[in-house]
Amino acid sequence: MNATPRQRFGAAVLTGVSWLACHLPERVLLELADFAGELWYRADARRAGQARRNLQRVADWLVAEGRAEPRIRAAARDPHAMDRLVRSAFRHYARYYLDVARAPSFTPAFLAERLTVETPEAFEAAFGEPGPRIFVGLHFGAIELQAYVAAVHADRPLMTPMETIDDPAMQAWFERTRGALGITIVGLREARREIMGALARGEPVGIVGDRDLTGGGMPAKLFGASTSLPLGPALVAIESGAPTFGVAVRRRPGGRYIGRLDPFPVPTTGSRRERVTAFLDQQARIFERQIAQAPEQWWAVFFPIWPDLEAPTR
């Protein structure tokens, strides 16, 4: 499908915005993103309510498990502290869009200077030897860097599925900019076939696994309550047998980042359904561990996660 003049104009505007984001001083960009996030919070009460319900569940669970930092404990019991957490979530969500625009400027030197690895043993296990790897990410922190970290350290192109945008000019922009970073985008319809082919060639793949966008997932407990997680990561890991890792990159002050990898032991015994269920349970535990570090950076909180929290609002 050919792009319309309006779509081409939109892609040109995005290209210009991206160029500015890659060349303006970082301090200015971060201040603009935080300002945009604050305006967004004030203008979108519905989305703020969604984030507040979800973050309250996360905070309550972390407190009950004895894993909450002081600011999270405060947010669990104090509405004003929770409001600060929600506002911070909006600022981080705005920074996600800044990361999208700045992605063409990412370099290995940028990672070497800005990224601290808090799980060096897992990084060595993931990147010490060549071969197929599966990296399961989530809508958390600097998701653009999650994929770039894997591509840089694996020293091979990273294949990742992405929902095809109806705007072909915008789709081409994403494919072009991600390709420059060593990230190959494939559509959801052909994702499974392409991903299995990449693994067979010894290449790494990345899959986001915390939101069941198609409605075809399986039930799992996340932060103590039932939700649905997509089957993609589990099926690909079980069918391929490739080493699998949870990946997360969270932001720190001063334009710094902390990256971590968590190994997934892929179940090898039991029925197919039992192995998928066991994998999803491990996946949920890893997500809890990664999100606990900075719940406000989990921008899936702006969307429905747990059905029981949505029924009363409807």
Image (spheres, rainbow, N blue to C red):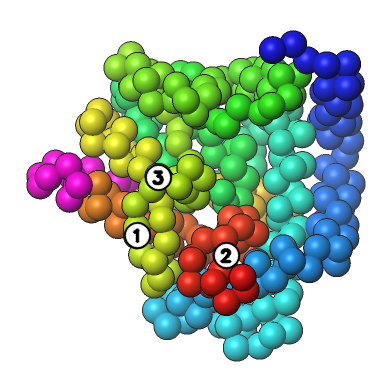
* Residue at the image position 71 percent from the left and 55 percent from the top: 92
Mark 3 touches mark 1? (CB < 8 Å): no
Closer to us: 280 or 312: 312
* Amino acid type, label 1: Ala
Specify which label sits upstream in the sequence, 3 or 2: 3
Graded by Cα atoms within 10 Å as few (under 14), some (14 to 19) or many (20 or more), the crowding at tag 3 reads few
Q: Nearer the viewer, mark 3 or mark 2?
A: 3
What residue is pinned by disc 3? 216
* Residue at the image position 57 percent from the left and 77 percent from the top: 312
| Residue 258 x %, y % | 56, 50
Q: In the picture provided, is 26 more to the left or to the right than 294? A: right
The local secondary structure at tag 3 comes to loop
Mark 3 touches mark 2? (CB < 8 Å): no
Mark 2 touches mark 1? (CB < 8 Å): no
The local secondary structure at tag 1 comes to strand
| Residue 122 x %, y % | 35, 43
* Amino acid type, label 2: Pro
Magenta-colored span: 263-275
Q: Quadrant of residue 182?
A: top right
Compute the Cα span from label 3 to label 1. Answer: 13 Å
What residue is pinned by disc 1? 220
Q: Nearer the viewer, mark 2 or mark 1?
A: 1
In the picture, the disc for residue 14 is: none
